[in-house]
Amino acid sequence: MPSLMVDFIVSLDGYAAAEGWPGFWGMEGPEYLAWIGKGAEHEHVALMGATTYRLMSGFAAEAPDEPGLAELTATPKVVFSSTLEPPLSWDNTELVAGDAVAAVQDMKRRDSRPLRTIGSLSLCRSLLRAGVVDRFRVVVFPVITGATGRDRIYDGYPDIALDLVDSRTFDGRLQLLEYVPTVLDGPPGVGG
């Protein structure tokens, strides 16, 4: 059965982006970019919601020859949305209008390729809450964006215990942390 990985890049204070800051907060380095490129070699299915689809397909249309975007265009993608209409313009993209959790459970049963999310905070929240996420990976960028941060990643999440299974530092400053998540009914050791 394939695994599902939720994959985020975050500021230290848990934001996915910040007003006026460039992508990767302008701190991506050669080691990290090379690692991202290597990850593209492993075939997987990218999962996303409508907002991320609109953003990323727009980037891909504007810069189709940019290596990272060209690789993402070639990657099989599934978009969960009740607002988008077929056919979708981005190559290799399937639209699923139904329940995302049920669709991902079905994909995990019938497909052998690993599944990975791209952005899509509410989709990831739903998948974690349903307990279908096998790995939770974050790359923490050394910046606090308290004044300009937007898209707080963990708001609305259930309580989750995280068992660290991998860690790595890129370019002497970016920290990758990979966990196996377990959704909790409440704080550990409380209750009967």
Image (cartoon, grey):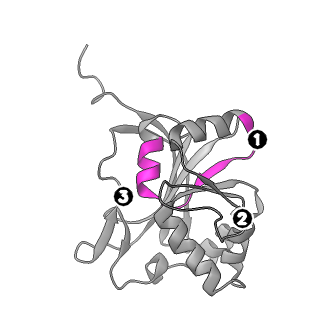
List x then y, in percent, for residue 49. 50, 58
SS of the residue under disc 2: helix
The foreground one among 91 and 47 is 91
- Secondary-structure class at tag 3: loop
Is residue 152 shown above or below 162?
A: below
User: For residue 105, which quarter of the picture?
Assistant: top right
The image shows residue 158, relative to residue 90, as above or below, that is above
Residue at the spot of label 3: 153
139 and 2: which is toward the camera: 2
Q: Earlier in the sequence, mark 1 or mark 2?
A: 2
User: How many C-alpha atoms fall within 10 Å of the one at disc 3: few (<14), some, or many (≥20)?
Assistant: many
Quarter of the C terminus within the rendering: top left
Q: Is residue 119 magenta?
A: yes
Q: CA distance from mark 3 to mark 2?
A: 24 Å
* x, y percent for residue 145: 29, 74
Q: Which stretch is magenta? A: 110-127
Q: Secondary structure at mark 1?
A: loop
Residue sitting at x 46%, y 65%:
51
Compared to residue 167, the image places residue 101 above or below, namely above
Q: Which residue is mark 1?
A: 112
Name the residue that disc number 2 marks: 40
